Image (cartoon, coloured by chain):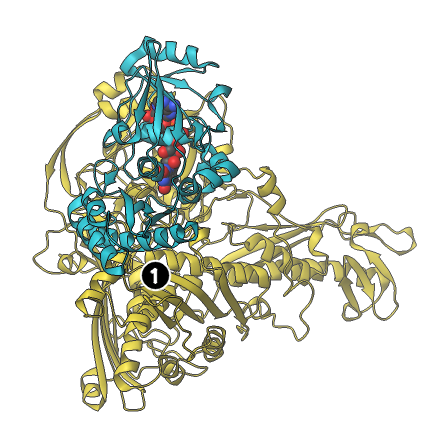
Amino acid sequence: MKPPPFEYYAPTTVEEALARLAEHGYDAKPLAGGQSLIPMMNFRLAQPSVLVDLNNIPDLSYIRPNEGGGLSIGAMARHSMVEKDALVAERAPLVHETMPKIATTQIRSRGTFGGSLAHADPSAELVCASVALDGKFKVVSQQRERWIPANEFFLGLFTSALEPEELLVEIQLPPFPKRTGWSLMEIARRPHDFCLIGVAATLTLGKKDQCKKARLVYLSAGDGPMVGQQAAKVLEGQSISPELFEEAAEVASSADIDPSSDIHATAEFRRHLANVLTRRALEEAYKRAIPNI
Amino acid sequence: MTTTVVHERIPEPIGESKPRLDNRKKVTGAATYADDMQFGSGLLYARILHSPHPHALIKSINISRAKALPGVKAVVTGEDFPGFIGLYLQDRHIFCRDRVRYVGDPVAGVAATSEEIAVKAVNLIEVEYEVLEPVVNPEFGASPDAPLVHPQLSEYKVVPFILPQAGTNISNLFKVRKGDVGAAWEKCAAIVERKYRIPHIQHVPIEPHVAIAQVDETGEVTLWGSSQSPFAQRNLIAQALGISQSDMRVVAPYVGGGFGSKAGVSMEALAVAIATKVRGRPVKLRLTREEEFYTAFVRQELISYFKMGCDKNGKILAMENRFYWGGGAYTEYGVNVTRAAGYSSTGPYEVPNVKTDSYCVYTNHPVGGPMRGFGMPEMHTGLEQCIDDLAHEIGIDPVEIRRRNCIREGSILVTGSKMHPTGLPQCIEETAKAIQWGQKASPSAPNKRRGKGTAIMWKAPAMPPNAGSSAWVELAEDGTVTVGLGGQDLGQGTFTVCAQMAAAALGVPYESVRIATPVDTRFSPYEWQTVASRLTWSMGNAVVSAAQDARRQILDLVSEAWGEDPEDLDIRNGVVVSYKSEQEIPLKDMVIYGLPKPNDSGWMGGPIRGRGKFMPTYVTSLDPETGQGERAVVHYTTGSQSVELEVDLDTGQVEILRGASSFDVGKAINPEMVKAQMEGGFVQGLSSALFEEMKMVDGYMQNPSFVDYRIATTTDAPSDLQSVIVEVPQDDGPWGARGIGEHSMVATAAAIANAIFDAVGIRMEGPPFSAEKIYLAMLDAGIVE
Ligand SMILES: Cc1cc2nc3c(=O)[nH]c(=O)nc-3n(C[C@H](O)[C@H](O)[C@H](O)COP(=O)(O)OP(=O)(O)OC[C@H]3O[C@@H](n4cnc5c(N)ncnc54)[C@H](O)[C@@H]3O)c2cc1C
């Protein structure tokens, strides 16, 4: 299928784009890589009558170091650019490891970092990784500029805190904490598919090598990025052991997530896989935290 | 036999992996596909209104609002086209008349000046339906309790070897009664009985179906389309419209993949039918991917029951098989799948006592058509698992039981025919060697289990006994050669292989041979269809015979001019040479203008054009009650496949580590392309084993897009894929060649299932073997938790 007819604008500055969005309000949508928006339009799941193409705005595509060890990524930075960036590899190893797991080479050469977040798909790796890493998002409109923490940005299925006239322009990732290991694991029908279930994990060790802090954020596990809050409670303050990870996995897969059934897998199987992945991700994160001790 | 060309000396470039003829055109984008063709501003766009119901009566159709829309040039319905269409069984109208039989059944068609207007017009057509109970299970469909999908079945026109059962949904029943199955069971030391269920899957070629039709003022019809079967389309559409085959022309440019879906006639008839109402203007119909899923051919689903028994040495004594083929709403083509499964129902084994009932059953599902393997993958997937189970039951190694029972030259086959020379035993050894059968490698992680599996296969070209081929060979002023043929290159490389054969038979370099494309029924020689893996063999024979005819004309002319015996002459590398006088003359100096007569007395010869044909003449009919006969088919290609895989005990995920294929192709005309077929077939088989399924609920497909219908891509193929060619010549194949196109996916799913069993000891009713299914089966079997 092809999308229904729409008007198309190709501004070259952020200001111009914001003016178009302000003018058309709910009828308009920004177009980034188009790897999600265009299929949604083809399936009539989205029917914007105006597209504001961001691809001609050079100012939105960058990766910059921040003072103190963090990173800023422009919304229009392509997945492939982030994937190959040395600074990302150094300062945001979880993101670096995540990128090749997003779709295929072809899609990563078009799809954008900001587009993936703005799309707010609970199956998107970056949505969960950004929450696990406590990222924050710079959002602008003609009227105002605001910063939204990742854990407040995602409101539900394909729903974010973005207002129709707003653009996501930058993502900031804080410095990666010391003594911290990471892991992003997922299970898909085929390696490049959206996953049946996945988890982004970070694990910070304390002085006595106990778990000081744990973040588990699940993909394809509910209406948004599903944070393993109860599992984190199980982990935090405890000394590391396989039994501890098992208990956390049990709690996360039964209490923290809310997966549904579709033609690819049942909810029960997804819970089972979440259990397996939680254990594996925690083990991997733990192994990676150790060398930093 | 018409053209036996098994030479002692294999001439160049037979057996050489020549580069494909179409490489450059395809890589540079110069190759023209049907959708690329330009028809100017007169082009109209067609869209189709499809049935939203799996089964319903059409109470009324109102097209007046659609007709009134500006830009709409024609709106047609079943009223306009009373004729029937169908390859083996004419059970289909071009547009539905009184009844719709699947979600997607064409109800009305529109031609308009733009695709947008056509879509709008389709939405303005009002149809009133009376919804009926759908038949969604072929086994139930075959029972007397099932509602009838085709109440007029007994009135349909049908070829003699297809046997519809009046008053039922059974559009064909093929029976085998050989030996005495009943008496054999008590002699068996082990018996297994199994049921399998194979879902509908689809061909999903990259290029969706597209057809452009034009009817001129005198009623002559031209159809341009992405087609495996230009001549069959000419014949069937002409019959349906009641016009002469000679007034129906089909032009078939490059095809972006077919796998069977573009054989016979499907959506092409819609474009032609609509075009009859807008004379003079070309009408283009192009399916979207969703329409591909809903309305193009699908592979039959199958519910199969096997019972087989062997003696204490593993010798198979009897088989009793029942197949319920879910043929979908129309089985005009699918009926022959049922028949093929019947006459192949023992698999590649010699079995003295056989009882088979192979039913083709109408359901309210999409239309079952030919798909790579033509029923054999579906049948072998169950049969070859059953053979493994029988081996385990009697305590014999699975490869060994196959060695002991597989068909060999002279074996008496399920139909009573005698097996021709075959390399199957050798194929079994090759794949066992390649996969290191008997050696168990340790898994890559403690939570994984490794397994190996093997499966063997046979398949004959499933076609009418007298499906024919023809060809011509022409030479140009510079001595280059153009081969005319009517088969189609679907990516399998048939043009390349035919060019190699023409070069070899004529005595010219491969590089100087061209193929006359696009295939055009007005100018190309007749070819039945590009199906059944029959082109290398059948069309190849025709090409060879045309090249030999041209060669004979050339040598006769030169022998006369030189006063030599043609026996002393030869054509080498484009030059006629005499072994006696050592004279020589390049072809370019004589193939158009001939040669001067001696003493300036005039000229002789003239433009050279060779003609050739081939048709098997020896296939006999089979007894309708017993399925026995002298010779059921032309030949069987046989082969073996093995896989090694790992199953993750925690998640049920399967990783295919290695695959090995070995097939007896008689003679590999182009070994690299034969291997490409083996690899491609393996991956498609893997895809059907692990991923593919058209999920049907109450007759509605749940996953009509690539988001939800998953096929294997390169990332899913194992990097270690071995292909071993075995060559036991076919007596009537060109240099002994027989087909390989379909065979390479027949045994794959079974080999994977057997390897999963080897790894974790579980069996499933049918593919796709998803992680969840495997995990649940492991839970059930108590292998995990
Ligand atoms: C076959 C396939 C497989 C895929 N698999 C995966 C996968 O495994 N994992 C995964 O994470 N993704 C996957 N994707 C999606 C891909 O990563 C997309 O690139 C991404 O989700 C959206 O990015 P985009 O730049 O293409 O955004 P678009 O499609 O252009 O836009 C997406 C949405 O975000 C809005 N938007 C975009 N940019 C902005 C902005 N700066 N400010 C405000 N709103 C904005 C758009 O209006 C639209 O609503 C897949 C896509 C395809 C086609």
Which residue sits furthest left? B145
Image coords of residue B62 (percent x, y): 18, 25
Badge 1: chain ID: B
Q: Is residue B153 visible?
A: yes
Question: How many numbered marks, from 0 up?
Answer: 1
Q: Quadrant of residue A24?
A: top left
Does residue B556 appear to the left or right of B47 in the view shown?
right
Question: What SS does tag 1 mark?
Answer: strand
Q: Is residue B373 above or below residue B274?
A: below
Image coords of residue B140 (percent x, y): 13, 58
Q: Is residue B104 above or below residue B358?
A: above
Label 1 amino acid?
A: Val
Q: Quadrant of residue B130?
A: top left
Image coords of residue A231 (percent x, y): 21, 47
Does residue A92 appear to the left or right of B483 in the view shown?
left
Residue B214 or residue A243, whichever sits in front: A243
Residue B165 or residue A243, whichever sits in front: A243
Residue at the spot x=26%, y=42% of the render?
A: A220
Residue at the spot x=47%, y=57% of the render?
A: B680
* Colour in which the image shows chain B: yellow
The residue tagged 1 is B654
Quadrant containing ligand 1: top left
Q: Is residue B274 above or below residue B706?
A: above
* Colour in which the image shows chain A: cyan
Dot 1, crowdedness within 10 Å: few (<14), some or many (≥20)? many
Image coords of residue B168 (percent x, y): 14, 57
**Image quadrant in which the N terminus of chain A is located:** top left
